Amino acid sequence: MIFFDTESIGFYGPTVLIQYCVDDGDAVVHNIWDHTVGETLDLIESHVTHPSGVVGFNLTHDWYHYSRTYGVLAELPRRYRPDPLDYLDVEKEDIAHDKYCLKPVKACDLMLVGRKTKFQASLNQKQVTMRKVPKVLAPLLVEELKKNVPIPSIYFARSKKGYAWRIVPLIKGTAKEATSPEDEIDPDFVNIQLKFAPSTSLKAIMAYIGHDVVTLDDLDPLPKPEEYAWFPHYGGWSSVFNEHLWAWRNDPRRLEYAKNDPLYTRELYHYLGDPVLGDVDSELACAIGAMHWRGFAVDVPACKERLKVAEQIFSRAPVNINSPRQVKNWLHEVCTPLEKQAVDTTGMELLKKISDEWKEDNPELARRCGLIIEARRAEEEMTLLRRLIQAGRLYVTFKVIGTKSNRMSGGSESYIKSKGSINPQGIKKGGAIRSLFPLAHPDLILCGGDFSGYEVSIAEAVYKDPRLREDLLKGLKMHGLFGAEMYGLTYEEIMATEDNNINDVNGYYQRAKRGFFASLYGAMEDKIGKAMWLPKEAAKEGLDRFANKYSRIREYRENLQKKFTAISQKELGKEITWSEPAEYEESFLGFRRYFTLEFNIIRCLYNMARNPSEEFLELGKNLRVVRRDRVQTASGAALSALYAVAFGIQGQVFRAAANHDIQSPGAQMTKELQGEIWTVQPVGINKWYVMPMNIHDEIQAPCAPEVVDIVATKVANKVESFREKVPLIKMKWKTHLPSWGH
């Protein structure tokens, strides 16, 4: 098989090197600019058609570069050595983007294999915060934490400080962290934080395995080209071409860096257990890379017209909407002293609440909040439209495994986001904006569909409650059933409010919908009650009624909690005990979400609280602090903080596990459907037949006319196959759509 990697000018600029090895052979470095066009085309073709397949790390990126390089070079004479200016001219031509689709025989993306297994936790990780720790004990506690909470360096690979707990000052008399020089600092308490900066890069993983790796940061820096995630073919690279080419030709350390990549890839392949090539995630990584090169069709004239409207709306704001101080001062002009205290932030959530709910009490304030909201939304839209107009197409990439639940996420890597990206998963449903996207180029026809009752049908499959299944098969709606038990009303009474606004007094159905989804993803009764305008006790009673009616739901939740309970306390003041929790939650479709790191931290915090050092106890025994209305020794307050953090992390695990059981099967089914559509695209180098894009619970798929019916049949058969495990799953598939908005 082929183990390969690429080096390019910047992130999106032209490919400079293709590095590869075949099976156990030596690494070969192929400089595109030192070979004829024909030699490079032959090399790429040999990899694309290699019968044993290709293995890479972050194939989305490298397959984008293979597609780009082949598309451009194929328009130049085969005996010709590439010239930057000629390359740039061809790159601008649509034919270079539109002519060829590259699809390997089979593929394996080791980055994705790692995210499923050994390196899943390095995807993302919530920071750990110890709240209101006695200030006098904080430095010692930080040292104890460093010593007793061992965490692999890979979780801090993107941080210059590495593994570091930090002490954060608080505003006096509050639990808020001090962020301004004007804040009055609390003399008694601080927060202690651990921020993760994980990496799943090849070099970070190889360093973790034990290699003394050389990273790009260790090499002489090269000038960075101007580039944008939303316009990857922008020609800013030409001004730095010579410096980059010289370095990749002549710098021995840089060449050694490049040569190591396919060797590291091969070693990692064996380290991860020689995974089988051709898994759906790896295949989709190549598909996404190829589609990122071509881009999706955009109605540029319509974008220009809509931009004019957005600019008009934006201009109505009388203050700088990006200045919190100006916005707050303008709102305070029409506030009473008491209202000023309530309007203590300019965040969208508060502004929307005031705009919706204060129309009678303070109509002018509600109007001003609405104006700021409109202006901010218009600004976001202006940014999107200007990018689409400049690029002429929708260029998007996706992380095939973007979350620990296996969901695909849109946007770019974090270090590109500063220059902006377009995340199609963030474009709201509705025809207005989405109608700007025909998606299908003139040679293709837009087809697409979304799952109906997506989360509800998956939840039903998770719970396996016979009474619930019976009710849903009768045509009853989950949100109506949930609302009836929560509000103590009949199902018919809830459904009669289906069309009411969520903020109406009688907006029972919409609030029930919001409350159900909150419960689905592990929210407690206080949060569910807030979502449904119910007191906490009433919410608890409603949840009990719902669980009594559908007993398998209660059973599922109790089993999940038992499975992931490491520390417990029967009642306040009693001993906190330990029991060994499960390491992972596995969805009914087989994808595992690991909690190894979380429980390692909980275990260490528990042991520290149970057996604190003598120095720690001695320092705090004669000090007294008031913490949560209780007088404690400083050391006692710090130990309470340790337990609080441990219980907090455990609560996060409960919610994440419940979330995983719903989101993971949904993500997997959507990706498998996308992968099934991708099978219509022939292996090798051919014209474009399909371009399937995954947006949460929907698939948009521009198709060649001759495969429209084939794709529709594949979709129907695939969805039918899901019903073995998700009996209620459905999808409406449509063909010949004018745009995404349709």
Image (spheres, helix red, strand yellow):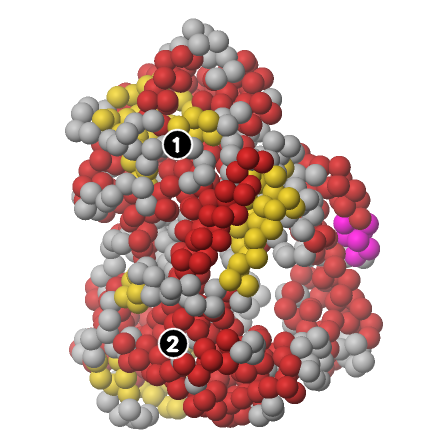
- Residue that mark 1 sits on: 683
Q: Residue furthest top?
A: 79
In the drawing, what numbered circle is on residue 464?
2
SS label for mark 1: loop
State the separation of the CA atoms marked 1 and 2.
40 Å
| Amino acid, disc 2 | Lys
| Residue 314 painted magenta | yes
Image position of 593 (left or right of 524): left
Whole-percent x, y for residue 176 in the image: 50, 72
Whole-percent x, y for residue 8 in the image: 42, 27
The stretch of residues the image draws in magenta is: 310-317
Residue 334 in sight? no
Is 178 in front, or is 390?
Answer: 390
| Residue 282 painted magenta | no
Quarter of image, res 701: top right
Whole-percent x, y for residue 58 in the image: 36, 40
SS label for mark 2: loop
Picture layout, residue 465 above or below residue 47: below
Residue drawn at 73 percent across, 73 percent down: 356
Q: Give the overall secondary structure of the magenta segment.
A: helix
Image position of 562 (left or right of 168): left
Residue drawn at 65 percent across, 71 percent down: 350
Quarter of image, res 64: top left
Residue 94 in sight? yes
Is 507 in front, or is 353?
Answer: 507
Picture layout, residue 135 above or below residue 119: below
Residue drawn at 32 percent across, 36 percent down: 106
Image position of 526 (left or right of 142): right
